[in-house]
Amino acid sequence: MMIDYRIRKTLIEAVARRVIASADELTDLDRAIGDGDHGINMRRGFEAVLATVDELSAKNLGESLKGVGTTLVMKVGGASGPLYGTLFMSLGKSLADEVSCEQAADAFATAIEAVKVRGKSDVGQKTMLDVLFPLLGVLREGGADMTARLRATAKAAAEDTIPMRAIRGRASFLGERSIGHMDPGARSCALIVDAVADVMEGLA
Amino acid sequence: MSGNVGIVIVSHSADVARGTALMVEQMVGREVPLGWCGGDPGGGLGTSVEAIMKAIEQAWSESGVAILVDLGGAETNSEMAIEMLPEERRDRVVVCNAPVVEGAVMAATEAASGATLEAVRRTAEELTPV
């Protein structure tokens, strides 16, 4: 499909608004197993994105995504800035305005590797990667109802981090006590996917 | 290469970063280029890529810059800041795997003797239990 200016702007606004609206929830999750700033940091980053949405979405999809990534790197503050920044910048490097399902999957696979390197982390360690990786599987499968499956997979994958034990980031200091709480980064990832899915379903 | 290796201190807290910088200055003197930053872009506890880039600029030395960090986000943000530097500078900045206060003092002491970036990093990292 073709991601034109209108869709780019709608997507960026929807994602930013969802993250901003969920800041308290993310901070509550982070207070349980991290340092309690994930929502505050993400809200600051996406408020900066929202403030420049016209400028960001005026560029082609690749440059728009890179612009979102750079803004998050500069404004978020916590480790989630470089992690989400790397995700969006990597996607921006791989994607042109006309995106096929296969291209999206390839771009996503490359971006996941970049996030792994940035966070020195891997799947199964109670991080955003535990949501990103299952999404790649859905993109690879393709087929009908993909938006609905992406949404459901992200939500379930975030919930699947609850019994995991963190071994990266601040939550790792808690060891066994990190078990029983959803990872805030996994939750913010699922929220972003949910906002993207809303937009895509609105277009269908 | 010319000049002593520079030292950058990155903490989640501006107070910790400033306090550490004062200790370095008092114990090692001012012959080592020094930069520090602490706090997120909103002024709360955290770290900022932009502030780290400025601190690297402030401590810049042709011999390189060693960064000392406190907790996880400081390390991730420092690595991101290094990647955003001009290409010719990227290879001359390292993040030391060492405790921030002791590491900064040890690294600066080594740097003051005119040691290479690698030697400065090694000295700081000797403090880290294997």
Image (cartoon, rainbow, N blue to C red):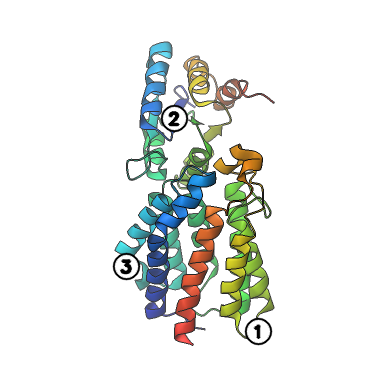
Three-letter amino acid code of the residue under disc 1? Gly
Q: Nearer the viewer, residue A74 or A47?
A: A47
x 38%, y 75%: residue: A10
Q: Quadrant for residue B16, please give it.
A: top left
Q: Is residue B105 above or below residue A155?
A: above
Label of residue A60 in the image? none
Q: Chain of mark 3?
A: A
Q: Is residue B53 above or below residue A16?
A: above
* Residue count near mark 1 (Cα–Cα under 10 Å), binned few <14, some 14–19, many ≥20: few
x 44%, y 29%: residue: B9
Q: Which residue is mark 2?
A: B8
Three-letter amino acid code of the residue under disc 3? Glu
Q: Which residue is mark 1?
A: A143
Three-letter amino acid code of the residue under disc 2? Val
Residue A121, percent across and down?
64, 49
Q: Chain of mark 1?
A: A
Q: Are marks 2 and 1 in contact (CB under 8 Å)?
A: no
Q: Does any portion of residue A100 appear in the rendered image?
A: no
Q: Which residue is mark 3?
A: A55
